[in-house]
Image (cartoon, coloured by chain):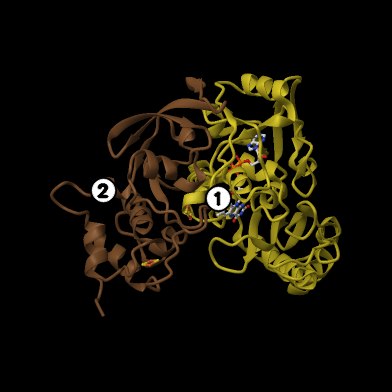
Chain colours: A brown, B yellow
Amino acid sequence: MSNASIIGKDGVKRYLITITVNGDPHSKVVKANNTLTDFLRDELDLTGTKKGCELGDCGSCTVLMDGKAVNSCLILAIEADGREVTTIEGIASTAEIDILQQKFIEFGALQCGYCTPGMVMSAKALLAKNPRPTELEVRQALAGNLCRCTGYVNIVKAVLSASGQEVAHD
Amino acid sequence: MYLPDFEYYAPDSVQEACKLKAEFGPRAMFFSGGTDIMHKMKIGTLAPEILISLKNLEALKKIEYVPGKGVVIGARATHNDLVNSEILHKKYMSVSEAAHQMAANQVRNIGTVGGNLINAVPSADLPPILMALDASVKLVGTKGERVIPLEELFTGVCKTCCCDDEILTEIIIPDQKMTGSTYIKFGLRRSGALAVAGVAVAVEVDKDVIKDARIVLGAVYITPKRAIESEKFLIGEKISDELLAEAGKISCTECKPISDMRGSAEYRQNLVEVLTKRALRKAIDKGHV
Ligand SMILES: Cc1cc2nc3c(=O)[nH]c(=O)nc-3n(C[C@H](O)[C@H](O)[C@H](O)COP(=O)(O)OP(=O)(O)OC[C@H]3O[C@@H](n4cnc5c(N)ncnc54)[C@H](O)[C@@H]3O)c2cc1C
Ligand code: FES
Ligand code: FES
């Protein structure tokens, strides 16, 4: 069904959408051209999700939609209406950070940190589907996440270690 | 990077979507996964006034086997739906494998097979393997529906014969006599790169003789291109390395690549020769489609 809408003073239509983000439903009135990245960052102040290329190449905007890793920069907020979205802010509990976050710290899997939320979300989607991935599977799952600092080695190690596998520190 | 303003509709049925499109005409566009549309709108090469989202057409997400018809892939199935489909694993692993070579995981969760076909860029990865398997597509519009061979869908660079108010609803891969198939893509990186050239092949092999062959070249012509002469050359022949090498040589006379930032025309022609030979060998040895 098409969404309820009103026309703004500028003559542009706004639509009522509800997206469940990190467990809580958020209803907002948005323009159709609002991307999911902007919805999360500007409407909900969830600025953990980053903007890099904004064209689907770098993965820094990665979130989970209904459990699957997606580039939020390529998704219209209105297309996510009625869906469940998980961002980097939603994976830690109040008391404890997620095992992936712990392992990224332990293995020094970040430098500037800009790619990290996207990396962690891609890894999160992988481990949910495949709890003991091989190194190749980790690399394939992270192929859409570009890091301009670390050289990836420690990121791959952190993910393998988060899956409970023995990994050597260097 | 902000998108221009547009209006948005999300109809509940194919008929309703076609009616809206007929009503709005060229001001409107169908929006499936949006990976191509969003990209073009952001870089400013596309500015539709109205987007008609296909997101509520859940029935178009199915992948099923219909006896007597074949494997039917809903146009809204995402690339990862193809990668993970058990039906495809059983019947056409080569289609799953081709989808796995596309983009990266996040884009594969959004982009759809229908969008890949209708977008009709010469480097698209799904048309070659689907054409090699003799797939057809169903187009539904306000004036009725039609089923055409996929090969006839493509009419030029980013051009198809899908009419203004028509929706591509499904792709049908008929039951095969082919015994092996594969798609080999050559990109400049192992992941997230578009094809510089791609070759899909389906063969029917009986003992050591090629009974039938279909060869489809990607990224080297204005549309995906059958290498008909090369196919003819192979049919009825006994398999040998020399035979496959010669088929590669013939294939490369059947394309007409352009030079661009990903490779020169000459380089692409050489790729076609080598990839044809390799794809034939792989499809022959693999023994399944
Ligand atoms: C980062 C990135 C990497 C990519 N890598 C690859 C790659 O490796 N290989 C490759 O082949 N492609 C690649 N692509 C291109 C793109 O992802 C695919 O072409 C995708 O399949 C398009 O599908 P969509 O659903 O997103 O299309 P959309 O953007 O929704 O639509 C594309 C076009 O098709 C029309 N359309 C869509 N569905 C229908 C339908 N059912 N009926 C009628 N018209 C329809 C739309 O109106 C539009 O004109 C990449 C894109 C990005 C952003
Ligand atoms: S910002 Fe979305 S992929 Fe780069
Ligand atoms: S840590 Fe800087 S981009 Fe990855």
Residue B137 location in percent, x, y? 70, 36
In the image, B148: left or right of A157? right
Residue A52 location in percent, x, y? 46, 57
As drawn, the residue found furthest toward the left would be A95
Tag on residue A91? 2
Tag on residue B96? 1
Residue B171 quadrant? top right
Q: Is residue B74 visible?
A: no
Q: Residue at x 36, y 50 (%)?
A: A125
Q: Is residue B241 above or below residue A120?
A: below
Residue A159 location in percent, x, y? 30, 63
Secondary structure under tag 1 reads: helix
Q: Amino acid at mark 1?
A: Ser
Residue B126 location in percent, x, y? 64, 49
Q: Give the alpha-carbon distance from disc 2 to disc 1, as whole Å.
A: 31 Å
Q: Residue at x 62, y 43 (%)?
A: B37
Q: Quadrant of the C terminus of chain A?
A: bottom left
Q: Is mark 1 within 8 Å of ligand 1?
A: no
Q: Residues within 10 Å of mark 1 (few under 14, many from 20)?
A: many
Q: Amino acid at mark 2?
A: Ile
Q: Is residue B51 above or below residue A56?
A: above
